[in-house]
Image: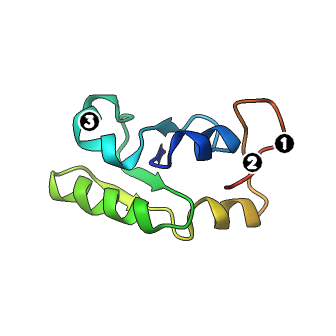
Amino acid sequence: MLDVREDDEWAAGHIEGAVHIPLSEVPGRLAELPAADQLVVACRSGARSAQATAYLQQIGIAAVNLGGGMQAWSAAGRPMVSQSGAPPSVI
């Protein structure tokens, strides 16, 4: 799982075990991508992750966009964590 949201969004709530690389930093931090047969990419609503997914696919990395992003993940009641220990949220 790759989360391409900004630092404040990540800190508020994210999927445990995800790798955080803001969208603008993805091209320069490819070495940090998690090893996976297929990389799932997430953002708040799915727009930024769609951009990241398209880029990753162009360079030969198997990536898919998390439809609906973290908003849909949270709305479905799926688990999240926050960096502060406060209840996680999607901002």
Which of the two discs, 2 and 3, labels the residue nearer the N terminus?
A: 3
Give the mark nearer the N terminus: 1 vs 3: 3
Q: Residue furthest right?
A: 87
Amino acid at circle 2:
Pro
The answer to whether marks 1 and 3 mark residues whose Cβ atoms lie closer than 8 Å is no
Left/right of residue 50 with respect to residue 79 in the rendered view: left
Please state the horizontal and vertical placement of residue 91, each as a whole percent of the image.
67, 55
Which image quadrant for residue 35? top left
Residue 78 % position (x, y): 74, 55
Which residue lies under the disc numbered 1?
Answer: 87
- Callout 2 touching callout 1 (CB < 8 Å): no
Within 10 Å of disc 1 (Cα), the crowding (few <14, some 14-19, many 20+) is few
Report the amino acid beneath label 3: Leu
User: Label 2, label 3: how many angstroms apart (C-alpha)?
Assistant: 26 Å
Q: Residue at x 50, y 49 (%)?
A: 5
Q: Is residue 37 above or below residue 70?
A: above
Q: Horizontally, is 56 left or right of 74 in the view?
A: left
Q: Which residue is identified by label 3?
A: 30
Disc 1 marks which amino acid? Pro
Callout in the foreground (2, 3)? 3
- Residue on which the image places disc 2: 79
Q: CA distance from mark 2 to mark 1?
A: 11 Å
